[in-house]
Image: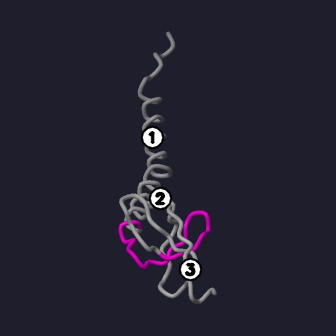
Amino acid sequence: MEGAAPSLFSPLIFLGFLLLFMYIVIIRPQNKRNKEINEMLSKLEIGSEVIAASGIIGKVKAIKGEYISLEVSENVVFKLQRSAIANILPKGTIESIK
């Protein structure tokens, strides 16, 4: 009686489960988060109160393509990339923290 030939089916099943696991745990949540970020950035408008990824809070004064002008104080305006915006704050947030 000779030894049974190794099956090629078993490693393929393992590889399939590994790919499925990676999709469920890594790829799908990242795609969902990217979609949420894009939706948030599409709602950005002049007058919105935002917080940048660096922690700077300000009000959007102008939007030109992928760049925004963020007023952080009177006559102090930063130019940032749209992707640097971490969150849009509720109206009146800046006044409440002064």
Looking at the rendered image, the disc whose residue lies closer to the viewer, 3 or 2, is: 3
For the image, the number of numbered tags is 3
Q: Secondary structure at mark 3?
A: loop
Between tags 2 and 1, which lies in front? 2
Residue depicted at x 45% and y 40%:
19
Q: For residue 81, which numbered disc appears in the image?
A: 2
The x, y position of residue 92, in whole percent, is: 51, 88
Q: Residue furthest top?
A: 2
Q: Secondary structure at mark 1?
A: helix
Q: Residue at x 39, y 62 (%)?
A: 38
The kind of secondary structure element at disc 2 is strand
Q: Indicate the quadrant where residue 60 lies.
A: bottom left
Residues 89 and 28: in front is 89
Q: Is residue 42 left or right of residue 18?
A: left
Q: Earlier in the sequence, mark 3 or mark 2?
A: 3
Q: CA distance from mark 3 to mark 1?
A: 53 Å
For the C terminus, which image quadrant?
bottom right
Looking at the rendering, the stretch of residues picked out in magenta corresponds to: 41-59
Label 2 environment density (alpha carbons within 10 Å; few <14, some 14–19, many ≥20): some
Viewed as shown, does residue 43 lie left or right of 10? left
Give the residue at the far front of this rendering: 75
* Residue 34 magenta-highlighted: no
Q: Amino acid at mark 3?
A: Glu
Task: Give the residue drawn at x 44%, y 77%.
Answer: 48
- Label 3 belongs to which residue? 74
Residue 55, quarter of the rendered image: bottom right
The residue type indicated by label 1 comes to Leu
Between marks 3 and 1 in the image, the one whose residue lies nearer the viewer: 3
| Circle number at residue 75 | none
The residue at which mark 1 appears reads as 19
Is disc 3 surrounded by few (<14), some (14 to 19) or many (20+) residues within 10 Å? few
Image location (x, y in percent) of residue 8: 43, 23
